[in-house]
Amino acid sequence: MHRPAIWIALSLPAIASAQQNAPLRYLVTEARIESKALKWLWPTGIVAVGADGTFIVSPNNSQAGINGFDANGKATSFHIQPGWRNDADIAWPERIGRLGTGFWITDPFNKQVALFSRDAKLIGAIPHPTWVHPKWSERRQFPIFASMDVLAVYPDSQLLIRPTRPRTLLDTPAYDRKIAHLLRIKPDGQIQREIARFDEHANNLLLRGSNSEEHVMPVPYGARQLWSTNNDASRVAVVLPGVVAADSGTFRVISIDARGDTVFSRRYPMATVRVTPAQVDSVLKSVRAYGATPTDSVRARLRRKIPQYRSYVTEVVSGYDQSTWVLTRSTVDSSTTREALIIDPRGEPIARVTVPVGFTPLHADRDHVWGTDKVKHEIVRFKVSTTPEPTVAPPPRTAKAAAAKE
């Protein structure tokens, strides 16, 4: 039976630790797109990039349409207008990626993955299967699923999904409903293999109210298990912060390939800051009872889940060239400074860069990062450079202007 790579990687010895000796580099603006078509980019949007540098952008509000740009950031004729009309090719874009020379766009409203050519013509679709189901030989390993979230499209048109709404017809002792599973499936819904598993509630405490409704309470100082997949699902990147004494001051990056096998599992340095008993006591003072669970019980359960050390990892981006970007924030809680560690496909550190304030990374390779400027609602492409971006000096004051100010 295929074991998901993340479980295998967690059992690897601690000697896999890697020293962060990556040189300091700089992000230099290469293209900045200011377009009325992007006015609905708040707060992020969707970006898909081709190997030639061309890319298409879909803001979160589908009314703005999906538009293409060349490698220099100039608008091209590529345009798709989503809508609820019968003649619209797509209703609501959720994710976008490259497939060959064209694009795939997930459309959960129409329950399909729409396939478009490089000139925005609809050339096909992968309908969502009625059921996501295991092979007969694995009927005890997985239930069937009534729905799914499409994450990426493999080059052979198989799908990387997160299944939802499990329906158990037989006992499935190997399937844990409390964690998230990433599966590779055929277009007809047959499960080919499990790629990874994640405990999405590792950073939460689940409580039940008087009407059996489920309440999610974040764990103070909790460390999230972060993950990201690139467009063709050739890599899934997982980041596990070290929160106990044995691995404090590090985060582990696990890179998983299209078969669910671990390519590398390495640890990289992070700031070592312990959560003190005084901080724990202080934060638990504001916790109150929920439903039938009394205050003392809620506090005790939270106390057991609070980590010994803080995590400063905020984001991970799996690059389309199988590189990985891991973003960390400053140890000063009031600071907005963030740094990214760029890692190559083998796990070797390439560079460290400071990430501009207000920039949200959406897509990356080892030499570039694409994302949105939250303040200006623009798409920006930065290039990793050995020299910083030139500072634009203000225009010199004229004698007339100086005299007027006096």
Image (spheres, grey):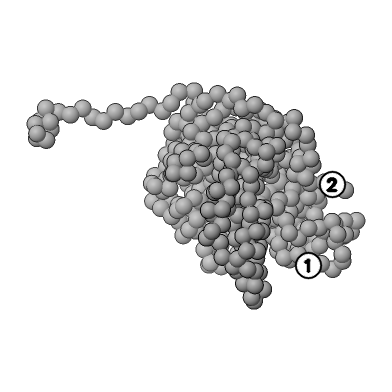
Q: Quadrant of residue 387?
A: top left
Judging depth in this view, the residue of 242 and 76 nearest the camera is 242
Residue at position x 57%, y 44% in the image: 276
Most distant residue in the bottom direction: 211
Residue at position x 43%, y 47% in the image: 374
Judging depth in this view, the residue of 232 and 376 nearest the camera is 376
Judged left or right of residue 16, residue 205 is: left
Residue 66 position (above or below residue 133)? above
Residue 2 is labelled as: 2
Residue 206 is labelled as: none
Residue at position x 81%, y 62% in the image: 143
Q: Amino acid at mark 2?
A: His
Q: Give the percent coordinates (x, y) of residue 333.
A: 47, 44
Q: How many residues crowd mark 1 within 10 Å: few (<14), some (14–19), many (20+)?
A: few
Tell me if residue 174 can be seen. yes
Count of numbered tags:
2
Q: Give the percent coordinates (x, y) of residue 164.
A: 71, 62
Q: How many residues crowd mark 2 within 10 Å: few (<14), some (14–19), many (20+)?
A: few
> Which of the two labelled residues, at mark 2 and mark 1, occupies the earlier sequence position?
2
Q: Quadrant of residue 49?
A: top right
Q: Give the percent coordinates (x, y) of residue 175.
A: 81, 58
Secondary structure found at label 2 = loop
- Name the residue beneath numbered marker 1: 167
Q: Quadrant of the C terminus?
A: top left
Secondary structure found at label 1 = strand
Most distant residue in the right direction: 137
- Label 2, label 1: how many angstroms apart (C-alpha)? 22 Å
Tell me if residue 104 can be seen. no
